[in-house]
Image: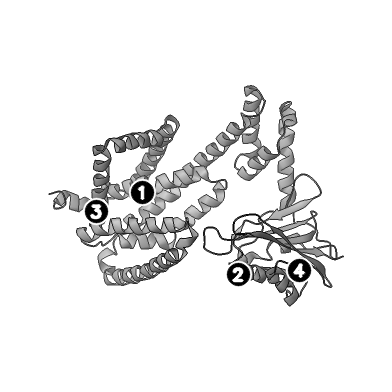
Amino acid sequence: MLLNSNIVSSLLNTREVALITWVLIGLEWLIIYPNSRNLLYNLIKAIFPRKLTILYLCTISYLTVIIYLLYNLNLWNNSLLKDTIIWIVITSSVLLFNVGRTKTPIKFLRKTVLASLGVASAIGFISNLETFSYWIEFISVPIIIIFSGIYVVSETKDEFAQVRSLLKKSFILLSYFILLYLIYFSVKNFDKYMNWPTAKQFMLPILLTLLYIPYLAIVSIYVQYEDIATSLRFKPISSKVLRIAILNAIYYFNLNIQGLFRWKNAVTIKDFENSTSIKNSMKRILDLQKQEKIPPKFIVLEGWDPKFAKYILKRYNLQIDSYVSELGEHWQGKSKSLKMSEDRMTSETKYTITGTRFVVKNVKLHLSMYDPSLKSELFKFIDIANELCLATIYEEITPEMKDHILNRLPLNHESDFGIINIRFNQWRNEKKGFDVYFEVNYKF
């Protein structure tokens, strides 16, 4: 039998054999049923269009060169072939897909490096050194898939919040048990696995990931410029002007993807009149980015320091990455939305600062409250507003302010250092949601 074969057992562990068995069962089911055959055919067509097929061939060629170099450095041999194939099929394909979607490739690649060197990679490696019997691994595969599917479905509806919470706690508890088992296993089998072949097996995915990053950077840059070119094709400009614009964008922005997208969003038809106007439109964005990197000269008694205002609510993950101007005197920065709970339809809070290049004159919290019955989310918003008050007007939020927020009543409050304005906007949705605006204006 296949499972008792010495060749298979020498190449694959029981977990891998169990996974392959389920994959074969799935493929057999897809081939037997006519509707499933059409689904499989359409899936293959979607995975292998012409452009992606070229990308796959380029990726395989690049990885072949990398493996050849590692082989010559005595860091790779035939015993690592299985691990290499698994890394290519799973890790490299996921990284390739994700880097093509991200609009911040530098951050993504930095996270990729940290992940490849992190504790999770070590735990994953240790967990594969010794596996359970075939039938335990075989039964565990559908169980994991079913519970993962239930968790994904539970995130789509609010009424499944208790199920989602129970599953999440169960996953955390199970993770602790697995971690303790792996620590015990590592200590017990330290001598068995402390050798050069095991070290190479551990280093392989890390080395492959690190050496894969330059290729991912090239792919990401190509995808970003391809997206820009596609969006510019909808503008009433000739193909010649489009080529000039793309070539200039590569010259001026190269790895500066954020600047590239800012130029794409700010450019007008007038900027495509000639080559000079195209270059000037790009230089304006680059000059603006240079200005933003220069720390502004903070003028005391005219407002808050932008550098200070950006990070007031950092511990709530409401920090502002950039304080920018749309080529004018009005400067503004906005944070990403903060979810107030784990529910899918949870309320969201944003933090905004506005002013001039040198000072921030206004800070504002905006809460989008989808379900007024969730008072805990409103209390969390009050805590955030309290921290904002302490940092800007040097006093805590008053009981009167709390009462007005909880009862949805507008309020103007004046202190020694600022004027606080609380206002609301009622929605017309089924649950009668609303917006809360908590605004602090510099007084002088």
Q: Looking at numbered disc 1 in the image, what kind of residue is underneath it?
A: Trp
Q: Residues within 10 Å of mark 2 (few under 14, many from 20)?
A: few
- Give the Cα separation between the discs numbered 3 and 4: 59 Å
Q: Looking at numbered disc 4 in the image, what kind of residue is underneath it?
A: Thr
- Circles 4 and 2, Cβ within 8 Å, touching? The answer is no
- Closest to the observer, 413 or 64: 413
> Picture coordinates of residue 225 (x, y %)?
58, 36
Extreme residue in the left direction:
1
Circle 1 sits in a helix, a strand or a loop, which is it? helix
Q: Residue at x 27, y 59 (%)?
A: 140
Q: Which residue is mark 4?
A: 392
Q: Which residue is mark 1?
A: 87
Circle 2 sits in a helix, a strand or a loop, which is it? helix
- In this rendering, does residue 326 appear at all? yes
Kindly identify which numbered label has been placed on residue 375: 2
> Picture coordinates of residue 223 (x, y %)?
53, 38
Counting residues from the start of the chain, the first of labels 1 and 3 encountered is 3
Extreme residue in the right direction:
444
Q: Looking at numbered disc 3 in the image, what kind of residue is underneath it?
A: Ala
